[in-house]
Image (cartoon, grey):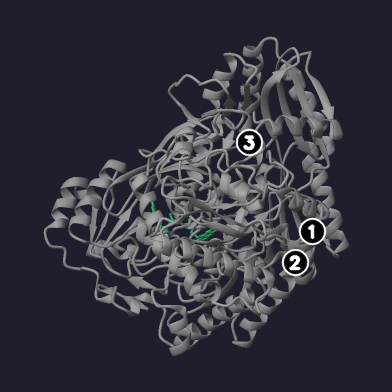
C-alpha cells in the first residue's frame, strides 16, 4: 500500500521550519525528498509512506532543539533507528519529519562494576558487545538483525532474540533513558538507584514503539561473558518431534540460553546461500541449542537436553567444536531471513507467540493454513519461548498472492490467539497489527493505553497512525468500519 | 450495576468498581490495601481531606492459572505471596523474587510496594517478571495490559506503571508472573568481616570477574559485620563457585549448604523488610559498597549487590546516593519526569481517588 504525502494529512509542505532545522543540524543532517526513498518504509515493505524530510541530529541537545522547532510548527515526528523493523513502525504514514539516529552512534561509558553501558540511541546492537568485550561483558539481547538494528529501535520495540530465552527481552536490560518528548523537552530518566524514584517511566517507555518520545540515550545492563558456551545442533526426522522436544525441555525447567528451530525449507534456503552453515539437508528440522555459564552447569544442561532429544527420536547431535564452528551455526540462523530472500523477491515474516505447551499444534496449523492457500511457509523461530516466525515467500507484483499471504498471516495470528497465544512476541504492533489489537484487548484496555499516550504526547504528534486503533473495537466489530487510523483523519 | 449472576471474582471486582465510583463522586480518596503489612509510609484513614478510605483487595484471592509447562502463574491480587510460593513450588518453580514479606502480604501489595529481594542482582527486579495485569483505575475502568505468556510485546506495558506506585495510580486486581525453576542446590558463603575494606574489595572484584552470585548482603553479626554471598543452581557448578567465592573472601569464610543455606538466606532477606528501619539509601553498587566499607552499624542492613541500605540513623547525604525517609510517601515533588507523571495520574484518575494528597509527617497527620 502506498501512502505518500496525502495519506493521514501530514504536512508535505515544509514552510520555513526546514531551514531552521537545517541550521541546527547542518546540511548533512537533513535528507529531503529525492534521497529519502530508503526512509519510505522499514522491513515491512508492503507499507510505504513519504514524509517531508529526514533529520539526523548528532546528540540529545540537538534532538531537543530540532523537536522544539517541529513542536512550534505542529509537525508530526517519526522516530527511526536502522529501519529494520518488521511491523511498519518507522514508516512515515502520516507525513511529517523522520528523526533518525544514524549519527548518534557513541558508546558514552562502560562501567564494569555496575555492569552497565551508557550509549546514544543510534548505536548498532552488535557494536555494543564489541565495545564491551574488553571489559569481559556483553549485551545479551541479540535480534537476528543485530548487525544493523539500533539500540534505540530495540528499546522502542522491546526487541528479543535467540538468547532472550535466558536473558529476557530488551526491557529487562534497560536501566535508564534520556528521552526527548514531543515538545522538545529532555526527560532525564537515568537511575539514581536500583528502584525508580516515582512511577516506572522507563519501564513503560520500553516497547512504546516511538510514541512517547525520541529515545536519545540509554543505560543498559551488561552480562559477564560466559566462561563456557556450548552449541549443539540436534537433527530431527520430523518438525513435530522437534517441537515436542522443546515443550518437554521447558516443562523440565532446563535453562539453556537459546533454543531455535529451523525447518526443512529454511535449512534448504540457508544451505543454498552464503550463510551455509552445514545444516543437514536430509533433516525435517533442526534444533539449535546453546547453553552458557560455568563449565559444570553447561555440561549438565547439555547432557539433559541431548537425552531429551534422543527420547524424541533425534537422529544426530552435533556439538560445535570451536568458536568458528559455533559462529557458523549461528550465522546460518541469523542469515535465515536473508537466505529466504533468494527463494522469492519478497518475504513476509510473521511474529506470533504460542503457549509453549502447544508448540507442535500451532506450528502444524500455520503450515496447513499456508498450504491451503498455495503458499510455501518456512519456519525459523525462537522455539524456547514459543515465539514463532512463519515466513512466507511471495512476489509483491502478484496481487492475488499478496492477498493470500495477508490472509494466511491473519489466520495464523487468529489461530494463535484463540489458543492462548500472543499477537506479537518481538516485532511490535506498528502498522501491521494495529487492527488486530482488538483481538486481544477490549475498548477499555485500549482506552487506557490511549490516555497514557496522551499523557506523553497530548497532541499525538509522535509516530501518529501506529499501534493503537483509533476507532472503538466495539464500533468496528459492529459495523465493519476500519480500526485503521490511517483511514480516518487524525 | 447488579452483581447478580457473576462469578464470585467478577462480583467482587464489580463491587470494588462501585466503591471507586462512589468515592470519585463524593470526592473521597481510597488506598488499596491487601494484607495491610506494608503501609508504614501512609495511613489509609487520614488524608487531611475528611478521611481516606481503604479499598480492600484481600477478598480477591486465588490462583487463576498455574501452568508448570509454561513456567507462568496468574493470580488474583489478594492472594497471599506465601500461598502463591507454595502453589508454584509443587511444580518445581519459585516466584521471580525472593523478598521479605510478612504473614498475609499479598501479591498485589508486594508488587505495589515496588520491592525486590537481594536476588535481583542475578534475577533482576521483580517488575521485570510481571507479564501482565488487570487493574482498576480511578475513573472505575477495569483494564488489562500485557498477557500471560513469557514473550509478548502487544500494546504498552502499562503494568509497569503500577509496580511500585503503591496504589496511588489504581488498584491491581490480577497479575501474571514469570517463574524461575527451584534450584537443585543452594549455598551461602559467609564471612565475619574483621577487615571490612578488604572483604568488600573482594566482593567488587568478584562482580567485575563475572562471578555467578545470586545475592550479597552485609548485616551486623555476633562479633562484627557479617558478609554473606548467595549462590544457587546446578549442584556441580555451585560447589565449584562457592569454593571460589569463599577463597576470594579469605581463609575464615565458611560455606553453608542447602537447608542451612536457606536458613541464612531467609534470615538476611527478612532483614530487608523496611519496617525495622527509618531510612533507605539507594545508589550505585560502587557508592553502596563504599558506604558499607565505612562500617556496618548495628541498625543497618546492606543489599550490597543491588545498591541499597536500610538504617535507623539518619544517613549523611553524598553524591551518587539517594536518601529517603521510609515513612514518607515514595515520591518527591521535584523528581525527574514529574510533569509527565502528573499527566499520567490525571489521565487515569481525574478525580484523584487514588492520589496521595498532601504529604504530611505522621505526627501532623494525627492532629489533622
Ligand atoms: C533480518 C531481520 C531479522 C530480525 N530479527 C529480529 C529478532 O530476532 N528479534 C526481534 O525482536 N526483532 C527482529 N527484527 C526486527 C527489527 O530488527 C527490530 O524490531 C529492531 O529492534 C528494530 O530496530 P531499528 O533500529 O531498525 O528500528 P526501526 O525499524 O528504525 O524502528 C522500529 C520502531 O522503533 C521506533 N524507534 C526507532 N528508534 C527510536 C528512538 N531512538 N526513539 C524512539 N523510537 C524509536 C520507530 O519509530 C519504530 O516504531 C528483525 C528484522 C530483520 C530485518
Tell which of A228 and A89 is nearer to you.
Answer: A89
Chain under numbered label 3: B
CA distance separating discs 2 and 1: 8 Å
In the picture, measured across the screen, residue B236 lies left or right of residue A39, that is right
How many residues crowd around disc 3 within 10 Å: few (fewer than 14), some, or many (20 or more)? some
Tell me the quarter of the picture where residue B262 sits.
Answer: top right
Q: Earlier in the sequence, mark 2 or mark 1?
A: 1
Tell which of B225 and A394 is nearer to you.
Answer: B225
Chain under numbered label 1: A
Q: Which residue is mark 1?
A: A251
Tell me the quarter of the picture where residue B264 sits.
Answer: top right
CA distance separating discs 3 and 2: 30 Å
Tag 2 and tag 1 share a subunit: yes
Task: Find residue A184 and report its horizontal and vertical position in percent.
Answer: 26, 49
Q: Are marks 2 and 1 in contact (CB under 8 Å)?
A: yes
At mark 1, the secondary structure is helix
How many residues crowd around disc 2 within 10 Å: few (fewer than 14), some, or many (20 or more)? some
At mark 2, the secondary structure is helix
| Identity of the residue drawn at 16% across and 56% down | A18
Evaluate whether residue B308 shows in this view.
yes
Q: Which mark is residue B121?
A: 3
In the picture, measured across the screen, residue A369 lies left or right of residue A360, that is left
Tell me the quarter of the picture where residue A357 sits.
Answer: bottom right
Q: Number of callouts in the render? A: 3
How many residues crowd around disc 1 within 10 Å: few (fewer than 14), some, or many (20 or more)? some
Chain under numbered label 2: A
- Identify whether B327 is placed above or below A394: above
Tell which of B77 and A339 is nearer to you.
Answer: B77
| Identity of the residue drawn at 35% across and 61% down | A454
Task: Find residue A435 and report its horizontal and vertical position in percent.
Answer: 46, 76
In the picture, measured across the screen, residue B295 lies left or right of residue A63, that is right
Q: Which residue is mark 2?
A: A357
Amino acid at each position: 500500500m502506498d501512502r505518500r504525502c496525502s495519506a493521514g494529512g501530514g504536512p508535505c509542505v515544509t514552510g520555513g521550519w526546514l531551514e531552521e532545522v537545517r541550521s541546527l543540524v547542518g546540511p548533512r543532517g537533513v535528507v529531503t525528498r529525492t534521497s529519502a526513498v530508503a526512509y519510505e518504509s522499514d522491513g515491512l515493505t508492503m507499507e510505504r509512506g513519504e514524509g517531508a524530510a529526514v533529520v539526523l541530529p548528532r546528540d540529545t541537545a540537538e534532538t531537543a532543539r530540532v523537536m522544539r522547532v517541529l513542536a512550534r510548527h505542529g509537525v508530526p515526528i517519526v522516530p527511526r533507528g536502522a529501519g529494520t523493523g518488521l511491523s511498519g513502525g518507522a514508516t512515515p504514514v502520516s507525513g511529517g519529519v523522520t528523526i533518525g539516529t544514524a549519527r548518534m552512534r557513541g558508546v558514552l561509558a562502560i562501567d564494569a562494576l555496575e555492569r552497565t553501558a551508557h550509549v546514544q540511541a543510534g548505536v548498532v546492537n552488535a557494536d555494543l558487545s564489541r565495545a564491551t568485550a574488553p571489559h569481559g561483558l556483553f549485551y545479551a539481547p541479540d535480534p537476528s538483525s543485530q548487525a544493523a538494528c539500533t539500540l534505540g529501535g530495540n528499546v522502542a520495540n522491546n526487541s528479543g532474540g535467540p538468547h532472550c530465552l535466558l536473558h529476557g527481552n530488551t526491557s529487562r536490560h534497560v536501566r535508564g533513558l534520556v528521552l526527548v518528548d514531543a515538545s522538545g523537552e529532555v526527560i532525564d530518566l537515568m537511575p539514581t538507584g536500583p528502584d525508580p524514584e516515582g512511577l516506572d517511566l522507563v519501564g513503560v517507555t520500553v516497547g512504546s514503539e516511538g510514541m512517547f518520545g525520541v529515545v536519545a540515550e540509554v543505560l543498559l545492563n551488561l552480562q559477564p561473558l560466559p566462561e563456557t558456551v556450548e552449541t549443539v545442533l540436534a537433527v530431527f526426522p520430523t518438525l513435530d518431534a522437534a517441537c515436542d522436544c522443546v515443550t518437554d525441555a521447558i516443562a523440565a525447567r532446563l535453562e539453556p540460553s537459546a533454543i531455535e528451530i529451523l525447518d526443512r525449507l529454511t535449512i534448504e534456503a540457508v544451505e543454498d546461500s552464503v550463510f551455509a552453515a552445514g545444516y543437514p539437508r536430509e533433516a525435517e528440522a533442526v534444533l539449535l541449542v546453546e547453553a552458557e555459564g560455568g563449565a559444570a552447569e553447561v555440561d549438565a544442561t547439555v547432557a539433559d537436553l541431548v537425552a531429551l532429544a534422543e527420547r524424541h527420536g533425534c537422529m544426530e547431535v552435533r556439538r560445535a567444536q570451536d568458536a568458528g564452528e559455533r559462529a557458523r551455526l549461528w550465522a546460518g540462523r541469523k542469515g535465515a531471513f536473508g537466505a529466504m530472500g533468494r527463494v522469492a523477491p519478497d518475504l513476509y515474516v510473521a511474529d506470533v507467540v504460542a503457549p509453549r505447551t502447544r508448540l507442535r499444534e500451532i506450528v502444524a496449523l500455520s503450515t496447513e493454513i499456508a498450504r491451503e492457500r498455495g503458499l510455501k511457509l518456512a519456519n525459523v523461530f525462537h522455539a524456547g519461548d514459543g515465539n514463532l516466525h512463519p515466513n512466507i515467500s511471495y512476489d509483491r507484483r502478484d496481487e492475488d498472492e499478496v492477498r493470500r499471504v495477508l490472509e494466511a498471516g491473519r489466520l495464523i495470528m487468529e489461530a494463535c490467539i484463540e489458543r492462548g497465544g500472543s499477537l506479537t512476541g518481538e516485532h511490535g504492533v506498528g502498522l501491521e497489527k494495529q487492527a488486530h489489537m482488538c483481538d486481544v484487548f477490549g475498548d477499555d484496555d485500549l482506552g487506557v493505553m490511549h490516555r497514557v499516550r496522551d499523557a506523553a504526547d497530548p497532541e499525538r504528534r509522535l509516530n501518529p497512525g501506529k499501534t493503537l486503533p483509533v476507532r472503538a473495537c466495539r464500533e468496528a466489530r459492529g459495523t465493519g468500519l476500519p480500526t485503521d487510523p490511517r483511514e480516518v483523519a487524525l | 450495576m447488579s452483581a447478580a449472576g457473576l462469578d464470585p471474582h467478577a462480583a467482587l471486582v464489580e463491587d470494588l468498581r462501585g466503591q471507586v465510583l462512589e468515592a470519585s463522586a463524593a470526592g473521597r480518596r481510597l488506598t488499596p490495601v491487601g494484607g495491610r503489612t506494608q503501609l508504614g509510609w501512609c495511613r489509609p484513614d487520614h488524608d487531611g481531606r475528611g478521611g481516606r478510605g481503604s479499598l480492600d483487595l484481600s477478598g480477591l484471592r486465588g490462583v487463576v492459572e498455574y501452568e508448570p509447562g509454561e513456567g507462568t502463574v496468574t493470580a488474583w491480587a489478594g492472594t497471599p505471596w506465601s500461598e502463591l510460593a507454595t502453589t508454584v513450588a509443587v511444580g518445581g518453580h519459585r516466584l521471580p523474587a525472593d523478598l521479605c514479606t510478612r504473614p498475609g502480604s499479598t501479591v498485589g501489595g508486594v508488587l505495589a510496594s515496588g520491592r525486590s529481594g537481594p536476588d535481583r542482582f542475578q534475577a533482576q527486579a521483580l517488575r521485570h517478571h510481571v507479564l501482565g495485569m488487570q487493574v482498576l483505575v480511578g475513573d472505575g475502568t477495569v483494564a488489562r495490559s500485557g498477557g500471560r505468556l513469557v514473550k509478548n510485546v502487544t500494546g504498552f506495558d502499562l503494568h509497569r506503571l503500577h509496580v511500585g506506585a503503591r496504589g496511588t495510580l489504581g488498584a491491581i486486581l490480577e497479575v501474571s508472573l514469570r517463574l524461575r525453576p527451584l534450584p537443585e542446590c543452594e549455598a551461602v558463603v559467609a564471612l565475619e568481616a574483621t577487615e571490612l575494606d578488604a572483604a568488600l574489595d573482594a566482593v567488587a572484584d568478584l562482580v567485575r570477574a563475572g562471578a555467578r552470585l545470586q545475592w550479597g548482603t552485609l548485616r551486623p553479626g555476633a562479633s562484627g559485620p557479617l558478609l554473606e554471598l548467595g549462590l544457587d543452581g546446578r549442584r556441580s557448578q555451585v560447589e565449584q563457585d562457592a569454593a571460589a567465592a569463599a577463597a576470594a573472601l579469605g581463609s575464615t569464610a565458611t560455606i553453608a549448604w542447602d537447608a542451612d543455606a536457606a536458613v541464612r538466606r531467609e534470615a538476611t532477606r527478612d532483614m530487608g523488610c523496611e519496617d525495622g528501619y527509618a531510612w533507605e539509601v539507594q545508589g550505585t553498587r560502587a557508592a553502596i559498597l563504599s558506604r558499607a566499607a565505612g562500617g556496618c552499624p548495628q541498625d543497618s542492613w546492606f543489599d550490597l549487590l543491588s545498591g541499597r541500605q536500610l538504617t535507623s540513623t539518619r544517613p549523611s547525604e553524598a553524591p551518587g546516593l539517594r536518601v529517603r525517609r521510609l515513612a514518607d510517601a515514595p515520591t518527591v515533588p521535584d523528581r525527574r519526569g514529574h510533569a509527565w507523571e502528573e499527566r499520567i495520574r490525571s489521565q487515569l484518575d481525574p478525580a484523584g481517588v487514588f492520589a496521595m494528597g498532601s504529604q504530611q509527617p505522621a505526627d501532623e497527620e494525627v492532629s489533622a
